[in-house]
Amino acid sequence: MLERESTAGGTFLDRALLNPIEDTNRTFYYVVGALLLLFLVAVGMYAHQIWFGLGVTGMNQPMTWGFYIVNFVFFIGISHAGTLISAILRLSMAEWRRPITRMAEVITAIVLAIGGLHPIIDLGRPDRVMNVFTAGRLQSPLLWDVVSISAYFTASTVYLYIPLIPDIALLRDRGAKPQWLYAFLAWGWQGTPHQHKVLDRAINILMVMVIPIAVSVHTVISYIFSMTLQPGWHSTIFGPYFVVGAIFSGIGALLVVMIVFRKVFHFEAYLKEIHFAYLGNLLLLMSLLWFYFTFSEYLTGFFGHEPFEMKVFWYKFVGPYAPYFWAMVACNFFIPVVLLTFKKHHTIPKVLVSAIAVIIGMWLERLIIIVPTLANTHLADPVGIYIPSLVEWGLFLGGIVAFVLGFVLFSKFFPLISVWEIQEGRERSVKDVTERLQRYLPVHQQHA
Amino acid sequence: MNQKLILALQIASLGAIWILVTFVGIWILNLLQLSNDLRDVPDATLAISIIAVPVFVTIAGVLTYVFVGLQKGKRST
């Protein structure tokens, strides 16, 4: 049911979307307090690491990368939820996108900030990040990462902000507090036809722009691995494989967020079963694509039977990492395929279980890509052992807490579902879709 | 809050975006110069710079376009 409100200008139908901002209850403050506490624990652990050095982690020789780089790749992958999915849905004029895009864009901005910090956490001396600016080598894939992630973060923040302007102006006009913040961020929006035209044009430019940037980000991240000659990493399909995995995990994260906040804020009238069915189909498609890429990747390595490659191969398939490898296959392929192929009944619970499975599976995939290759070097060293320490687990959980905290705080100040796009959809969608249909469908000619 | 102060802050925030773009440009120029001095594949560095810098300029350009467009599109009161 829509929550109506009578205003001077008529009936405002979407009161429910502003409830989290205008009628914040006590639970919100308890949740934020608890999350802040957990976040501070993670900050304390990081301070411990800075003080005592990377010796407090499970990293050693040859295991020079561990959880931090796993989480870096994982979080940046999740970021594809947003901007890319939102941009593709906007570009394809999918009308059902309207209640989804904002949440997707928020996910992107928050996880990019979290993911982007992980390589700095991975540095024993964080001050050395300045070397990137003073003495970086722009022909190194590591520097490409810095450039592409910075560009993606800037583009996706702008892509989140610009469609937010009319909603910020709505809050300004309703007297939401802090008034100065909404007045500052609204940029003088009054909803005139000229302003709508400017906003539409800017969104169109950005949505076309962010798609190649998003694709480049995860391609470039894959280059960190594939540009080396390490077994298990040196692969020509790593770029698209990483992009597919990123979109896959991004859709999973988006679905979990949608289901949780739908329940918490009672958005049932906006996020309907059909949205979950459509995104579930997309998740199923990505699951099949992920399996195809994984199969191709491992079959090619197995067929070549290069000794070092096979060492890593068996380490994953039947060795110490076999439980994680097969759990990854179950989470990313079997669970989503079984649940999402038959989702006519209990759609939302099935989609939720699949989405959680995919998030876990994709994190395992990042772990499986990084650790086994480092453990089995080209040198005559014994096989490396990596056991993450409490500090690494703490910072991993800290990253998740930071994400939830960021999302909850965003929901306190801005609508999680775009109010103006919902209103625009009500006013224009039927007419637009009808016109489009008339253009697509063959015209029936009556003969005299 | 005073309307003029808000407008000044908005213009300042827009200026901050252009400062960021300028910083990115200077940073990349510095890396280009470094790779040239060290004879460290300067052509590859140049190729990446040609892609990177316009992206930031376009983002800042879009923001400026929106800000100016919204100010121009205001109802005259």
Image (tube, coloured by chain):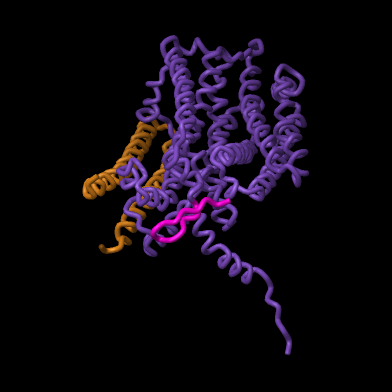
Chain colours: A purple, B orange
A364 lies above or below A266: above
Name the image quarter holding residue A443: bottom right
A376 lies above or below B52: above
Percent of width and height locating residue A250: 59, 39
Q: Nearer the viewer, residue A236 or A147?
A: A147
Q: Residue at x 72, y 38 (%)?
A: A336
Q: Residue at x 29, y 47 (%)?
A: B10
Q: Nearer the viewer, residue B39 or A74?
A: A74
Asked whether A324 falls inside the magenta stretch, the response is: no
User: In this image, A276 relative to A77: left or right?
Assistant: right
Quarter of the figure with the C terminus of chain A: bottom right
Percent of width and height locating residue A143: 45, 32
Asked whether A12 falls inside the magenta stretch, the response is: yes
Over which residues does the magenta segment extend? A1-14
Percent of width and height locating residue A252: 62, 38
Q: Residue at x 50, y 23 (%)?
A: A398
Percent of width and height locating residue A177: 35, 41
Q: Is residue A71 visible?
A: yes
